[in-house]
Image (cartoon, rainbow, N blue to C red):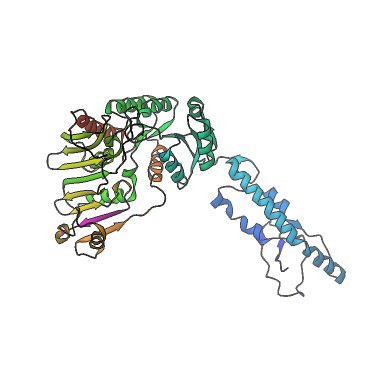
Amino acid sequence: MDWNLIEHQKSNKINHLPKRSGAQTRIRTTDTRIFNPLLYQLSYLGTSWRFRYPASLVDGLVFRQKRVGYNTKNRAVQHQLANFLPFFCLLQRACIGAFVEACRRDSYCMDETGEKTTKDRVFGWGIIGSGEIARRFASDLMLVPDAALIANHSRSAPNAQEFRSAFGSRRAYSDLDSFLSDPSIDAVYIATPNSLHLAQALKAIRAGKAILAEKPLAPSHTEASVIQREAARVNVFAMEAMWTRFLPAIVAAKANIDAGEIGAIRKITAELAYAHQYDPESRYFSRSLGGGASLDLGIYCVSLAMYFLGQPQKVSGLWYPAPNGVDMSSEITLHYDEAEAQLTSGFDRDGANHFVIEGTKGVLRLDAPFLKAQRLTVYHGFAQGAPFGPLQGPSGLVGKILDRLPLPGRRVEDYPFKGNGLQFEAMAMMDAMGKNEKTSTVMPLSDSINALRAINIVLAQPATTRIIKL
């Protein structure tokens, strides 16, 4: 095999010699080393892998060549020695690989003397719950740099272990106190039914853990206020997992509006509705679990409208009951001095599920389903009118064709992403905590409380009776 040979100079620097051009190339034998180019390349990994291996390790992996003369016999010995180099190379590769993996697994660095030094540790997440939304979050957490799923909790030990096996959690707990005592957990994601959010959030906060509670933050604005006060008292980060606000398309929409792209907002029209068969035991309809269309779907409409318009001066609306008395659907209107937001949600139908913002200079639409928007469309002039406009036009194939035809005054922006979209809220929370902030500027607890207050105002009114097809 054709190997490069280099000379170890007195200055301890390693200089490359020209490559061998043939079998007649002479070998200088004054204190030389047979050196694998792979090892030399590994010396550059210190920056990208965030560690440096001690010089003693390198010396142990370099094979010193004995001093030999230039006669024919010793040259033959050299060629025989070279035959073993592939084996030594593989051994060397294995040793270096094991060393690198040990450094990364144990999360520490080593300097040139072999001493341990500080290494940036990963952000440790814990998840309470093992349902569908918990699984989506755990899956998306794999897309977040410097984040790790440290532990998960479920009231059922088999469920906790199954979740751990599915998503690579390091530890699984069925006891909540033990889970919250895990020192490696930096933040807790609460992905349980709405009725459990308050108790679990308070327990996590009092254990000194930052919380990201799945929407709604609590079933009522009064309970959400308790979470806000306790987080402030303990001085820990707390946020509602209103993940839609952190999506790239929503960020772009906010930037467009702030830049005056559509002028001053005059009206918002939003619908979010998915048909669900009535089942009083399901989380959608169970009163004991905090069910109802407004808390499950309407919260997206209300929260996003307030994100663009702020807190309203007045709230009105009505709701329609399911057979057990929770809201099957609702219509909520937020009133502002010069604007209005008309928001509908329900389990009784499949809706258009888009979010339309009308301004004095144009219209911006978050395309369906807006809660996980990956596309927005901006309309100006002629393009705002039917049948090409942002509101519901022709349906089916014709509607799709019209929606995609090139049209003056209409601009489409795509913001695709991997996963379910929950990774963005996790990254935002980690970034805020890295800055020692205790609440999010994008999703402050005050916004969570205001959105819940608007919903509670409407649901506090007597239900509107109508025939609902089940």
Q: Is residue 371 visible?
A: yes
Any magenta on residue 30? no
Q: Position of residue 289 (x, y in %)?
A: 35, 29
Instruction: Name the residue nearer the viewer: 67 or 432.
Output: 432
Q: Nearer the viewer, residue 109 or 239?
A: 239
For image coordinates 54% across by 40% down, the residue present is 165
Residue 145: percent from left, percent from top: 47, 46
Q: Is residue 365 above or below residue 141?
A: below
Q: On the rendered image, what quadrant is the C terminus found in?
A: top left
Q: Give residue 394's quadrant in the image.
A: bottom left
Magenta segment boundaries in residue numbering? 373-380
Above or below: residue 421 compared with residue 39? above
Residue 379 colored in magenta in the image: yes
Question: Image check: 94 left or right of 382?
Answer: right
Q: Position of residue 96 (x, y in %)?
A: 66, 51
Q: Residue furthest right?
A: 73
Name the residue furthest left.
338
Q: Does any portion of residue 53 appear in the rendered image?
A: no
326 or 177: nearer the eye? Answer: 326
Q: Residue at x 19, y 38 (%)?
A: 331
Left or right placement of residue 452 versus residue 76 in this view: left
